[in-house]
Amino acid sequence: MEENESYDKLAVLIDADNAQSSLIKGLFDEIAKYGIANVKRLYGDWTGPQLSNWKDILHVYSIQPIQQFSYTAKKNATDSALIIDAMDLLYTKDLDGFCIVSSDSDYTKLCQRIRESGAFVYGFGEKKTPEAFRAACNKFIYVENLRKEEETEVEEKEASVTISTPHKKITTNELKMDTKLVTLLRSAVEDSADDNGWASLGNVGQNVMNRESDFDSRNYGYKKLSDLIEAIDLFKEEKRGENKHIYVKDGRSKKSNS
């Protein structure tokens, strides 16, 4: 960010029953792209052994553990504590956004309520996260994308299901055959374009996210949207200005290149 650019103040609320401690570094590296984690809380029943992996890293990331007893067998009480705290923070703290870390659909209504208040909602969860929860977030990030390639074979014993590995790059031909992706990108470029058909890649990315909260170029094996745009080979690209800002244009466009 530029020196005169402010950082968004974020609350990071983690459901320890539905998140893996092995992804904590990738999680906070990702959150750092969007702002400063002013509040960091981790919810669960700390009286049992199931959260032992979390205990070793609490102090490393300065996360506040929040105790929530499991009063009823097979009933997750963590979500209630997290939801209550989120609403309290929403009305008592000057925050720009919330990061809800869970794959549990019980947080869908919470995310909808936070968005209604004008705060930004980042969701973090596994691929199995229900669509309703993903759609309730302004932006949803799959935690599988946060795992570094060299980490894919470690700490899997902590998970009750196999941890997905980072996505391999999808080939150009395969990308072009993905009609949903092609339509999404072309529509985003068209809606962001100037009179000559050119669109700032930054505006295209924002438009895509507004349409699909869980869109991520990493889902297709590409680190950045610019890499995905180049790989799909359906758009013209050019860099402008001293900062080499990227602009893109639908390759089918007949408008002037000026």
Image (spheres, rainbow, N blue to C red):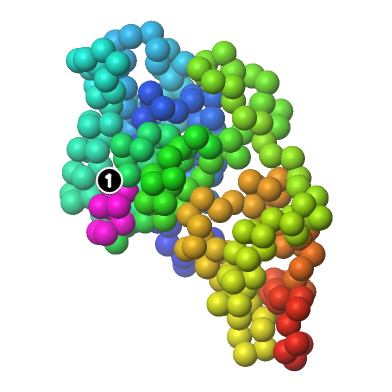
Give the x, y percent position of residue 177: 74, 57
Q: Amino acid at mark 1?
A: Leu
Q: Is residue 72 left or right of residue 220?
A: left
Give the x, y percent position of residue 240: 72, 78
Give the x, y percent position of residue 192: 57, 77
* Residue 227, magenta (yes or no): no
Residue at image coords 76%, 78%: 252
Task: Name the quadrant of the C terminus.
Answer: bottom right
Q: Is residue 27 left or right of residue 111?
A: right
**Which is nearer the eye, 223 or 131?**
131
Q: Quadrant of residue 18?
A: top left
Query: SS of the residue at dot 1?
Result: helix
Residue at image coords 27%, 34%: 82
**Main SS category, magenta section:** helix
Task: Name the quadrant of the N terminus.
Answer: bottom right
In the image, residue 114 above or below residue 157: below
Q: Is residue 40 left or right of residue 187?
A: left
In the image, residue 9 above or below residue 143: below
Give the x, y percent position of residue 67: 25, 21
Residue 3 visible in the displayed image: no
In the image, residue 251 above or below residue 169: below
- Residue matched to label 1: 110
**Which is nearer the eye, 125 or 245?**
125
* Residue 112, magenta (yes or no): yes
Residue at image coords 38%, 25%: 16
**Which stretch appears magenta?**
109-117
**Residue density around tag 1, few if under 14, some if 14–19, many if 20 or more, within 10 Å:** many
Residue 165 visible in the displayed image: yes
Residue at image coords 38%, 8%: 49
